[in-house]
Each structure stands twice: as structure tokens, then as C-alpha cells.
């Protein structure tokens, strides 16, 4: 297992330039609102935001280059037809269900105040670097993973690297987590680690309601809703489709569908340097699209176990690629090419 990442410094070498241009990528900062928007040709692509109410930094929303929103609106800005389950599912985020016994994943304002000592939150600290030029952009941030009393368990450094190519854009997220003064244990559990909550249209058609139980026994119900215009379909690098993708291992998974007639693909790619590669997939038909390299026990029905321990001062690195394609659906061949290119990337 690789617990350090020597390529971190490579993220700091993007040339500097003015961000005042209107063409291409540019940052529009709204620090008083805790929002840093990324625009492409004056159209919102995504925003890095750390509202107090969502308990962690997220990218929200995620839009295609042409402006189609592929993420659910609730709980920040609900749209007609949005599901209202799992209020902790917001945009694109990275956290985990059991870190020294604290639940970072399920934390939200829906948790009763008297129970919040069992949950953790991730707090934005600094923006170390922010750049944009043409089709490229970079955001380098630090955050702290804290308990309710304000004690820091983990220090996080994350680089978001963006690139636009025609009707496709992608994000490479590189995150280093470092334990501070105490040992940190990531218990082998289901809910984690990198996730997107997709728009209603990208859910998979379903004829039944469902209930999901978290590690603390809290049940969340997902109601059956009309299946009109629900078009999503998961496909993995191993050829699995639909619900069969859940709990399987694969180097990539894509979600193909249509939103208001516009064909779109949302995809995530694992990197060979990550622990547990190829990762397990926590991809649900109701719209949770997630990967979890640490939840081996539940996904393998007990055949594997993976409890990650970081001693004080020790680090682990996670590197993933997220792809948004508008105007068409990507194929397995397209995805294999993207994954091959990503696998040899050392940034």
C-alpha cells in the first residue's frame, strides 16, 4: 500500500496568467458566499462551494459545456421532480462513513442536534492556488476533517485540475489525507468515498421503492416515482450494466442517459496508484454514483476486509478522474482510451 505521493509538487507548476479573460475558462469568486464559480465562455461549468449547511466542500452543480445540469438540485436549489432523500448527497464530494468512529458521509442539517457528536465535518481552510487559461484551470485547496469539538483528525490537500475539449470536460481530483497527532482508522464500511448525486433524468428506471440503512441504523426511504424521461444506465469496464454494477470492481464506470433530449455521459475513472485498485462501485439506480476503495467487506460479502490505518504524520493519496460528455453518449472504447491515458498520468 502506498501511503505517500511524491508527485504533489507537480500540481504547482501550471504557468501563471490573468483570469480576466471572457473566452475559455475563468474563475468568478464570491468569497462572501463561500462560492468560487468556474465559467467556460461565460457559462457556469461548476462551482467549488463550502456552505456551512452542507458539512463539507463540494463541486455543485456539474454542468455540461452546453449548460445541461447533470447533478440533482436538492438540497441547495431544488428543481421540479427532484428526489428529497439523502440530504447529504450534494453535487460531487469526497468523504467517508467511519473515521475514528465519526460519520463524515451522512452528516447534514437533518441530523438531530443531540446526535451530532457522532458525526464529522470537513472545513475549508485555504485556497493555495487558483488559475485558469483557455481550456485549463486549477484549484488547489486545504481542508480539515474535524469532530464536533473542533479537533482535527485529518489535514487534506486537494488539487482540482480541469480541462475542456469540445463538448467534453474532465476533472482530475488529487487528494492527500494526512493524520495529525493521533492514529486515524478508516473502518471498512459501505458509504464512501468519491460520489456524485445525479439529476433525476439520469437515474435508472425503477418499479419499486427502496429503503437504505446506514451504519448507525438510520433508515432512509427512496420512494417509487414515475419513470417518464428516466434514462440512466450504468456500464462498467468489466461489461456489467445496470444494477449489476453495484458492489462490483472496475477501473471505470460510466452513466449514460439523456436530459431534455441531450445525450450525456457522466463517468468516473480509478487510478492504478490508488489503494484497492480497481475500486468497488457504490452505484445506485436512484442516483447515487459513487466509488469506495475501502468498503471491501460489504461489497465482497465478507470475502475481503480493508481497514485503513494512518499513524500520526502518515498520509495516503487518492486520485480520480471525472468526465462529463454532452451531445452524445461515450462508448466502452472511448472510456478505455480515457482510462489508459489517465493510468500513465503522474500529476
Image (spheres, rainbow, N blue to C red):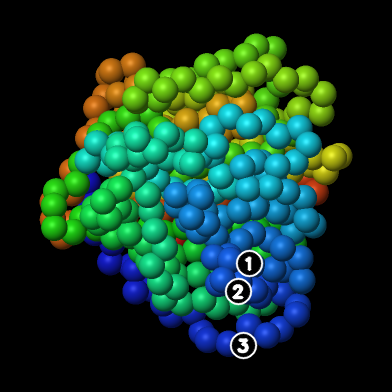
Confirm whether residue 130 shows in the render.
Answer: yes
Most foreground residue, 281 or 84:
84
For label 1, the residue is: 37
Tell me the quadrant of the picture where the C terminus can be found: bottom left
The mark lying in front, picked from 2 and 3, is: 2
For label 2, the residue is: 29
Quarter location, residue 295: top left
Contact (Cβ within 8 Å) of mark 1 with mark 2: yes
**Mark 1, residues whose alpha carbon is within 10 Å: few (<14), some, or many (≥20)?**
many
Residue lying furthest right: 261
Most foreground residue, 238 or 205:
205
Residue lying furthest front: 114
Say above or below: 131 vs 259: below
Residue at image location 27% in from the left, 19% down from the top: 303
Contact (Cβ within 8 Å) of mark 2 with mark 3: no
**Mark 3, residues whose alpha carbon is within 10 Å: few (<14), some, or many (≥20)?**
few
Q: Which type of secondary structure does the marked residue at label 1 adopt?
A: strand
Residue at image location 46% in from the left, 44% down from the top: 194
**How far apart are the alpha carbons under marks 1 and 3?**
16 Å
Residue at image location 54% in from the left, 32% down from the top: 86
Q: Mark 2 vs mark 3: which is more N-terminal? A: 3
**How far apart are the alpha carbons under marks 2 and 3?**
14 Å
Residue at image location 13% in from the left, 58% down from the top: 181
Q: Which type of secondary structure does the marked residue at label 2 adopt?
A: strand
Say above or below: 315 vs 223: below
For label 3, the residue is: 18
Amino acid at each position: 500500500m502506498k501511503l505517500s505521493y511524491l508527485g504533489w509538487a507537480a500540481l504547482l507548476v501550471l504557468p501563471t496568467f490573468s483570469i480576466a479573460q471572457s473566452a475559455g475558462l475563468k474563475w468568478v469568486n464570491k468569497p462572501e458566499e463561500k462560492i468560487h464559480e468556474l465559467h467556460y465562455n461565460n457559462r457556469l461549468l461548476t462551482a467549488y462551494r463550502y456552505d456551512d449547511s452542507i458539512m463539507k466542500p463540494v463541486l455543485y452543480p456539474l454542468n455540461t459545456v452546453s449548460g445541461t445540469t447533470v447533478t440533482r438540485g436538492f438540497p441547495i436549489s431544488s428543481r421540479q421532480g427532484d428526489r428529497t432523500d439523502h440530504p447529504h448527497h450534494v453535487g460531487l464530494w469526497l468523504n467517508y462513513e467511519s473515521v475514528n468512529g465519526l460519520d463524515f458521509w451522512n452528516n447534514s442539517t437533518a441530523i438531530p442536534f443531540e446526535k451530532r457528536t457522532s458525526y464529522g465535518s470537513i472545513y475549508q481552510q485555504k485556497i493555495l492556488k487558483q488559475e485558469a487559461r483557455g481550456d485549463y484551470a486549477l484549484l488547489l485547496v486545504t481542508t480539515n476533517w474535524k469532530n464536533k469539538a473542533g479537533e482535527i483528525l485529518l489535514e487534506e490537500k486537494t488539487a482540482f485540475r480541469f480541462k475542456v475539449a469540445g463538448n467534453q470536460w474532465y476533472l482530475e481530483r488529487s487528494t492527500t489525507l494526512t493524520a495529525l497527532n493521533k492514529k486515524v482508522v478508516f473502518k471498512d464500511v459501505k458509504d464512501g468515498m468519491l460520489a456524485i448525486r445525479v439529476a433525476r433524468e439520469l437515474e435508472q428506471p425503477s418499479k419499486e421503492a427502496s429503503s437504505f440503512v446506514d451504519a448507525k441504523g438510520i433508515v432512509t426511504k427512496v420512494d417509487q416515482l414515475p419513470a417518464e424521461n428516466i434514462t440512466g444506465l450504468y456500464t462498467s469496464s468489466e461489461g456489467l450494466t445496470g444494477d449489476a454494477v453495484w458492489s462490483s470492481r472496475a477501473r471505470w464506470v460510466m452513466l449514460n442517459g439523456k436530459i431534455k433530449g441531450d445525450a450525456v455521459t457522466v463517468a468516473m475513472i480509478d487510478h492504478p496508484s490508488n489503494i484497492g485498485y480497481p475500486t468497488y462501485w457504490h452505484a445506485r439506480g436512484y442516483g447515487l454514483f459513487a466509488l469506495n476503495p475501502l468498503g471491501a467487506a460489504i461489497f465482497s460479502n465478507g470475502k475481503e476486509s480493508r481497514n485503513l490505518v494512518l499513524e500520526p504524520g502518515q498520509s495516503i493519496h487518492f486520485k480520480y478522474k471525472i468526465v462529463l460528455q454532452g451531445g452524445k453518449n461515450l462508448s466502452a472504447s472511448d472510456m478505455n482510451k480515457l482510462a489508459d491515458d489517465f493510468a500513465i498520468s503522474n500529476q
